[in-house]
Image (cartoon, grey):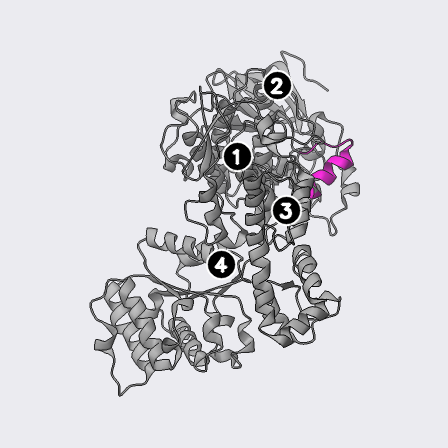
Amino acid sequence: MAIAAGTSLGRYEIRSQIGVGGMGEVYLARDSKLERDVALKTLPAEVASDQERMRRFVQEAKATAALNHPNIAHIYDIGEAEGVNFMTMEFINGDTLRTVIHRDNAELGKLLECLIQVARGLAKAHAAGIVHRDLKPDNIMITDDGYAKILDFGLAKLVEPEQPANPGTISENITMLISAPQHSTSGMVLGTLGYMSPEQAQGLVKEIDQRSDIFSFGCLLYEAATKHRPFVGDSTIDTLHKIVYEPAPPIRDFNPVAPPRLQRIVRRCLAKKPRERFQNIRDVLLELEELLLETGSGSGAPQSTRASAADASTVSNSTRATMVSGSSPKSPINQSQTRRISEVPSKHVTYKGGELHDSPGKPWSQEMPDLQEIKQTSGAVPLNSNFYIVRDTDQDFLNAIRRHDSIVLVKGARQMGKTSLLARGLHQARSTGASVVLTDFQKLNAANLESIESFFLALSEMIYDQIDVDTEPQEAWNPRRGASINFERYIRRVVLEQISGPLVWAMDEVDRLLTCQFGSEVFGLFRSWHNERSLDPSSPWENLTLAIVYATEPHLFITDPNQSPFNVGTKLELKDFSVEQVADLNERYGSPLDLQTDVLRYWGLVGGHPYLVHNGIYEMKKRGLNLQDFEALADREEGPFGDHLRRILVLLARDEQLTEVMREILRGNPCPTTESFYRLHSTGLVTGHSAREARVRCPLYANYLERHLL
């Protein structure tokens, strides 16, 4: 029942009701003691009567009140009077973010400036261990002078019951939704329908953390860019199904002039699995700030909201920019229509710094990067390339390098992007002041591999050529010592001592060493350095990180696990591109695949293989082919993958036994031996977790090889 105007609750006099929600009613009230207006929110009766939930609520409210951040509405008081439990907070004179987004004259740049402020507030709260749990446009107020304020921090936890023994299905969880505006939840932390994360929709209470807020923040970004929510179904259960299982429609379906980088930021925020999202809102914040800086100049944001890094623990103190031409069209594009790039409304696009940029105030033609520049991505992708797709493994690898882990192992089949990933790790190491050595084992000639002596001398000379030490290997070599002792002494007493700091030694294509007669001795030496570092943290080996990149299964060649560096350290494996990553890359190339269904078909054709994905999209863009035309040519000798497919055939022709194994797999039979499975797996021709599960990597390979081998 609404509280009448003029009613006093302790020192607070009710003036008027200003809102009703699933977690209580909100009133404008006057604080007679401090003579200021406040927002007074009553608490639901079922919460106020539950002693344990009230205790947890008070604890959460106290923590929130201590945040003291300009983008978080401040909590003043918690009280009880006339049988009513309530809390008072800062009264904000302005409009909700929902109202601001859906104004006809809303500019995307201005909206993103507001959301950057929201991200700062979230960063402050997350750093204190507080998760909002119900982030939505109605819980964000925009003041008349442009400040963004987050409301109801921590209140979602107020309605959280104890974790049920068995979380319900989506259908069962619908019963938890109540008939309140925006479908606020009761009895379970589901958030608000349309903005909740997949883990909230599934009732996985214990899995809700700051990454759930990041998903909801992605929904806000999406709505700011499109004026539409990312997940809208015909019914509640349909909407929940979309949240858990279906990707959001591309932003360009509603707003074809939105920056491509914004689509990539949103897509990562909206990843279904928490581990695939941004792991920290601070990273989203930095991405958005860089986006605004790249797309224009000038800012309408209040000066005091342009925070320094100290303010949100993350933010650069640079001026924010405004995207003049980024407002959203009122009518969405029919998703069933094929929409070519040439149909997009005019606007000027330039390419610099690895991104497509909008230039305000200029008419535009659809300028794309030079196709020859794009083609470079068929090998190692350059560091500044706009066409590099970040996978989960990237952050894990960079973190391992940053931690100075002893051994970092990166496994992946041929042409999976191992060298490109390695380059980024080494770039990061250099930027932190570490010394870096890169050894490509493909550069070693037959003479270098004749003996372990010549091999270690060759490695030492390659290291000497790349870092600043004043002792050549031959000067430190003593013929009376064994090759391994000479090499170890050179690394420890010359290299590590003279550089006096971290050294990252990256080894690419180490598979070549696995088949050498002295390979086990070399790898055993690497393992011993790892062991010494573990036993004596003060040893010189503490400064050495070995980053080893390989494709072949090492245990086929190293029989003693105690002599292997491949079963210690940080182990990473590169995976194929997901459908979402293919869609991302397609957009970066200018969307030669027009529809989401085309992206899915193309992903199925090439199996998400990074090399094939890149080059196929490039060829479609270069030749102006649609997907149907491309599919007709893809597995042909004269087609876009002709050279690549012929190399596969030549590789198999060199090994009659392996060719016969491939024939068996093409016939649908299991791989006859584990060794042959791993050999084919390392080449990228088959996939699966074991010889029994072996199958051809993708339909493209299957079609081509069946025609030539069966």
Dividing the picture into quarters, in which one does residue 430 lie? bottom left
Q: Position of residue 660 (x, y in %)?
A: 68, 73
Question: What's under tag 1, amino acid-wise?
Answer: Pro
**Residue at label 2?**
27
Quarter of the image with the C terminus is bottom right
**Residue at label 4?**
418
For the residue labelled by badge 1, is the local secondary structure a helix, a strand or a loop? helix
| Disc number lying in front (2 or 1) | 1
Earlier in the chain: of badge 4 and badge 3, it is: 4
Q: Counting other residues with Cα less than 10 Å from the Cα at mark 4, is it few (<14), some (14-19), or many (20 or more)? A: many
Task: Name the mark on residue 260.
Answer: 1
For the residue labelled by badge 2, is the local secondary structure a helix, a strand or a loop? strand
Dividing the picture into quarters, in which one does residue 270 lie? top right
Q: Is residue 210 visible?
A: no
Q: Is residue 654 magenta?
A: no
For the residue labelled by badge 4, is the local secondary structure a helix, a strand or a loop? helix
